[in-house]
Amino acid sequence: MSLLPLSFSLSSFAISPPVTVHQVIRTLDPRVPFAIKRRLVEPLLNRTFAIPLAEGEFDALEGRRISLTIADLGVTLSLTLESQRLLLCREKGEATIRGGWREFLCLATRREDPDSLFFQRRLIIEGDTELGLTLKNLLDGCEEGLAQGRFGELLLGLERLARRE
């Protein structure tokens, strides 16, 4: 009498490849309700840019919409400025800055010169290029970069993750 099951298949023991961060984000992003994205993204952006917003440096974006598309993650965030607050909006931007997540990470952490990222076409401005350049120049003008506080810790963690991939 045999203790093994009658039918035995090695395919049931196949090892699936590890799930990547890209796959997780691509799967989760479309399922996260817009209201939750707003509650996560808006406070983060408004704290990060509190000083430039208060000083009116972003006023050129008032009532305008700009999209940031992280192509390799399938994520697009559209932003507008109202009453000196950055808000997530559902409408497509008049301008879009498109690139991979590593390029946006380089931009945010100032690991590479923003102009180089654009000249090398690693980040691309589409649509209203004047509006896109305005945002790029505003981000470039933030002397301390975006890697400050909790947002900075998140960015630095992502940078470590990028080095491992």
Image (cartoon, rainbow, N blue to C red):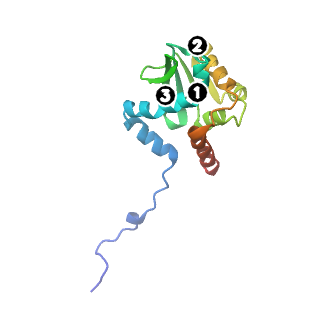
SS state under label 3: strand
Residue occupying image coordinates x 59% and y 48%: 161
Task: Kindly report the distance in space between the C-alpha atoms of the residues bearing marks 1 and 2.
Answer: 15 Å
The three-letter amino acid code for the residue at tag 1 is: Phe
Q: From the viewer's perspective, is residue 27 above or below residue 61?
A: below
The three-letter amino acid code for the residue at tag 2 is: Ala
User: Which x, y percent locates residue 106?
Assistant: 66, 36
Instruction: Classify mark 1: residues with Cα within 10 Å, few (<14), some (14-19) or many (20+).
Output: many
The three-letter amino acid code for the residue at tag 3 is: Leu
Residue occupying image coordinates x 57% and y 14%: 59
SS state under label 1: loop
Q: From the viewer's perspective, is residue 140 above or below residue 153?
A: above
User: Which x, y percent locates residue 153?
Assistant: 59, 43
Query: Which disc, if any, is residue 60?
Result: 2
Residue occupying image coordinates x 54% and y 30%: 47
- Look at mark 3 in the image and give the residue it sits on: 77
